[in-house]
Amino acid sequence: MKFLDQAKVYVRSGDGGAGSMSFRREKFIEFGGPDGGDGGRGGDVWVEVVDGLNTLIDYRYQQHFRAKTGMHGMGRNMTGAKGADVVLKVPVGTQVMAEDNETLICDLTVVGQRFLLAKGGNGGFGNQHFKTSTNQAPRRANPGLPGEELSIWLRLKLIADAGLVGLPNAGKSTFLAAVTAAKPKIADYPFTTLHPGLGVARIDAREFVIADIPGLIEGAHEGVGIGDRFLGHVERTRVLLHLVSALEDNPGKAYKTIRRELAAYGNGLAEKPEIVALSQADTLDADARKKKMTALKKAAGRAPLLLSAVTGEGVEAVLRGLMSVVQEARGDTAAAAATVGERWKRD
C-alpha cells in the first residue's frame, strides 16, 4: 500500500426534498383538504476515524463526495425519506483543514470520533402547512433547501510516543528495525526512507510507539532535499531521539544542522524533550569514540548516549531513556484529564 499523508477533497451535502402539493380525494369523504407531505432532509457528510488505516491513499483516486438528495414529499401526508449520508473514513491522527490549508476545522485523534463536515438541506413544507381559515385549499409547497459544499484538505499526522530525527543515513531505520517488528528499507545511500514508518518498542514490560521519518538536510525548510513536510508526523510525539552518525566528520555540526531545521519548522518541535545519541558506534575505535562523543557533547550541551543498533550496544539505555520521558508525559496527560473530569462533575 502506498503512503499518502495529504489529500484535497470536495464534499457536498444533499439538497432537501421538495414538499408536495396534494389534496385528499376519497369516496364518501365529504371534506378533503390539503394533504401534501414534507420533503425529506438531504444527506449529511461526515468524517470518521476508523481502525486499520494508516494512509489517505483512498483519496488519491476519489476526490468528490456527494450525499444523496432527500426524497420529495407525497400525498396522504407522507414525508419523504432522508437522503443517504456520506462518511469519509480516515486513519487516527487526521486533521481536516479548510481550503486554504491553514485553518484547522477538526483534529481527529481517537478511533470512532466523528465530525459533521456539511449538513444536509432541510426538506420543503407540503401544502398542508399553508392551510388557513381563509385559504382552505392552498396551492403552494416549498422546495427543499440546498445542501452545503466545500473543499477541504485531509492531512495525516501519525500518532507516536517517540520520533526519530537526524541527517540521512544516521541509522534511524536501522534502529527502528532493531527495536521493533517494523521492516523499513535500509541501504547505504541517502534518503532510503521516503515515507514515515511506525513500530512498537518494548522495554521492561512496557510499550511505546516510535515514528521514523525521512532524513533532513541543511535547507530542508526551504525545500532542499525532500523538504521538511514529514516533520508533521513527529509533532504529536512526546520525545525526540536525535541520532547523529559516528561516520560524520563533524558530529557537532550535524547536530546543529538538524536543530536549525527543527527551529525553522516551528510548531513546538524545537522545544520537545530530546535524547541525543551517537549512532553507528560499532564503526569507531575507542579513541575515535571519545573524540566524537566530546564534540557532540559540546554542541548539544548534554552528554549523549552511545548507540549501535547493529551490535545492540546502548540500545536498552536509549529505550529506557525514551520510556522514562514517555511515562512522565503519559502521567501528566492522565492527571490533566482527571482534573478536567473532576471540574466537569463539580460544574
Image: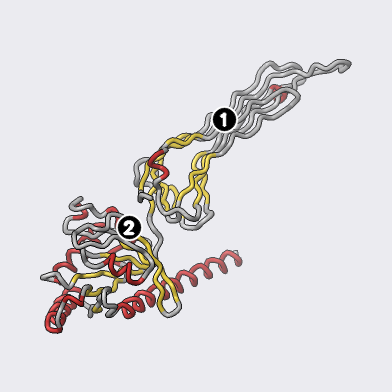
The total of numbered circles placed on residues is 2
- Determine whether label 1 and label 2 are within 8 Å by CB: no
Which amino acid, mark 2?
A: Pro
Q: Is residue 271 left or right of residue 249?
A: right
Residue at the limit of the structure toward the bottom, as seen here? 286
In front here: 161 or 178? 178
Query: Is the residue marked by circle 2 packed among few (<14), some (14-19), or many (20+) residues within 10 Å?
Result: many
Indicate the position of residue 168 as horizontal and vertical percent values. 21, 62
Tag shown at residue 288: none
Q: Residue at x 72, y 24 (%)?
A: 128
Residue designated by label 1: 69
Which amino acid, mark 1?
A: Thr
Disc with the residue nearer the chain's start (1 vs 2): 1
Residue 320 sits in which quadrant? bottom left
Q: Is residue 346 above or below residue 121?
A: below
Indicate the position of residue 279 as horizontal and vertical percent values. 23, 73
- Determine whether the residue tagged by mark 2 lies in a helix, strand or loop: loop
Q: Is residue 257 above or below residue 130?
A: below
- Determine whether the residue tagged by mark 1 lies in a helix, strand or loop: loop
Q: Residue at x 25, y 76 (%)?
A: 308
What colour scheme was applied to this rendering of the protein?
secondary structure
Q: Can residue 26 be spotted in the picture?
A: yes
Residue 220 sits in which quadrant? bottom left
Residue at the limit of the structure toward the right, as seen here? 28
Q: Is residue 264 above or below residue 19?
A: below
Residue designated by label 2: 196
Query: Is the residue marked by circle 1 packed among few (<14), some (14-19), or many (20+) residues within 10 Å?
Result: many
Q: Residue at x 42, y 75 (%)?
A: 327
